[in-house]
Amino acid sequence: MPNTESAKRSLRKKEVRRLRNRSERSALRTIVKKVRVAVGAGDTVQSKDALQAAIKRIDRAADKGLIHKNKAARDKSRLTKACNKLAAAGAAAPAEN
């Protein structure tokens, strides 16, 4: 346990930050999962919308230092690649009437 006043304050601040980071990280994982689920379901429109929201959230998390900038770039690249692959497969499929 902290002994000095400054150490006590530091402990309180760390706890607030830990809870905020935990919440932000959870929200980030959820929005990334939405993209993956949409891609898995083959829904091109929903996956593109979810991708835009995910990229925005990933960039914000990287700017705040929640995740490393290289992890942000890697995640965005993988999600974009999956969405593009889905879109290409949809465009290559013959139109059914």
Image (cartoon, rainbow, N blue to C red):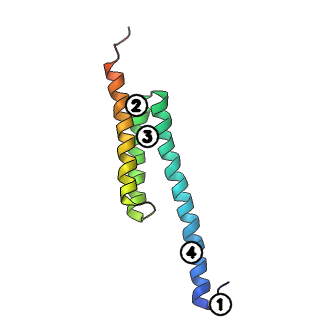
Report the side of 83 relative to 27 (left or right): left
Residue pointed to by mark 4: 14
Disc 1 element: loop
> Of tags 3 and 1, which is closer to the observer?
1
Q: Amino acid at mark 2?
A: Val
Residue 77 in which image quadrant: top left
Q: Which mark is residue 21?
A: none
What residue is rendered at 57% in x and 88% in y?
6
Inter-mark Cα distance, 2 to 3: 9 Å
Residue pointed to by mark 3: 50
Residue pointed to by mark 2: 45
| Earlier-in-chain disc, 4 versus 3 | 4
Disc 2 element: helix
What residue is rendered at 42% in x and 47% in y?
54
Report the side of 1 relative to 68 (left or right): right
> Of tags 2 and 1, which is closer to the observer?
1
* Image vertical order of residue 35 relative to residue 1, above or below: above
Q: Work out which quarter of the rendered image holds the N terminus and state it.
A: bottom right
Q: Amino acid at mark 1?
A: Asn
Cβ atoms under marks 4 and 2 closer than 8 Å? no
Inter-mark Cα distance, 4 to 3: 32 Å
Disc 3 element: helix
Q: Amino acid at mark 3?
A: Ala
Q: Nearer the viewer, residue 8 or 81?
A: 81
x then y, percent, for residue 76: 37, 47
Inter-mark Cα distance, 2 to 1: 56 Å
> Of tags 4 and 3, which is closer to the observer?
4
* Image vertical order of residue 16 relative to residue 59, above or below: below
Inter-mark Cα distance, 4 to 2: 41 Å
